[in-house]
Image (spheres, rainbow, N blue to C red):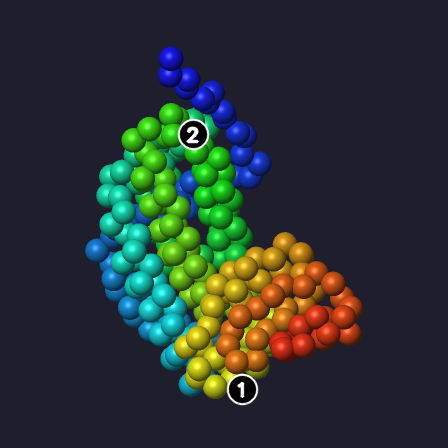
Amino acid sequence: MFYQLPETHPEPTFDFKLATILVIKLINTIYSPSFKRLITKPFTVKLEFQCDNIKPLEAKAKETLHRDLKNHLSDATEEQKRAYIEFLTNKVDCKLTKKESKGQLTELSPSERELITKWVYFSARFNNPHVLGEHQQAQFALHCLLNDVSDFLSIKYGLNHGLVNEKIDQALIIFLKNKPESFWTNAFLSDLFIIDNIALFNGNIMHIAVDVDRLSTRTCELNDIDYLRKQYAHCDIYCVA
C-alpha cells in the first residue's frame, strides 16, 4: 500500500503578507516589458561612491545576473511560478487584493531583501512532494529567480542609497578608491552588499574580514581585533559596527 507522508503547516514568524507582496512585485518586474531596460541601464550611484571602479563593479553585477537568468528564468513558466505563489498563500490562508498584487520593484532595501529571504526559507519547508505535486519545479525555479534578482536589486540599492551605516560605507569607499579593477572583476558582490549588510542591519556582526585581492568577506561577531588578525592573516579587517 502506498504511504502518503503527512502534510504539515508551519506558521510564519515574519510578516508573510508583506513578503508575499514583495515576491509578487518581483515577479511583475521580471516579466514586465521594462525589465531588460532596468537591468541594463547604468546604475545610479551616490556621490561618495563615484569613481572609476564603479564600472567593473556594475559590469560584474550585470554579468552575474545575466548568467543566473540564463540558468533559471526558463526552468518554469511565469504562470507556473504564479500558481505556486497562490498555492503557498492558500496554505497559509493569506489573502491579497488585486491592488496589493500590483506594482514593480527597481531596488530592494536590506529590510525588504531579508523579508524575501525569509519567504524563500519558509516556502522551502513545504518540500513534501505529495503536498507540492505539480508545483515542485516551479518552487525550485522561483526560489532561484528570487535570489538572483533580489541580489541584483540589493546591490543597486546599496550603491544608490548607501549601506546600513557609515562605517561599512567607508569600507566600501576604501575598496572603490584604492583597489585594482581585478578586485571587482573577481568579486563576490553578495558577500558585502547582501550577507554582511543584512547581518549588520540585524546587529549580528562587529567586523568583516576581506580578501586583499578580491571582494570576498567573512563576517565576525567578535570584537577581539588581535584574534581576528591572527585568524584571518590573509585578510584586511574592518570594523563596521
Tell me the kind of residue under disc 1. Asn
x 33%, y 69%: residue: 63
Q: Mark 1 or mark 2, which is nearer to you?
A: 2
Q: Is residue 16 above or below residue 33?
A: above
Inter-mark Cα distance, 1 to 2: 50 Å
Drawn side of residue 20 relative to residue 82, left or right: right
- Of the 4 image quadrants, the one containing the N terminus is top left
> How many numbered callouts?
2
Is residue 136 in sight in this rendering? Answer: yes
The C terminus appears in which quarter of the rendering? bottom right
- x and y percent of residue 199 in the render? 61, 57
Q: Amino acid at mark 2?
A: Asn
Q: Position of residue 234 (x, y in %)?
A: 63, 77
User: In percent of the image, x 63 and y 69: which residue is there?
Assistant: 208
Mark 2 sits on what residue? 128
Q: At x 28% / y 52%, what residue is drawn?
A: 73
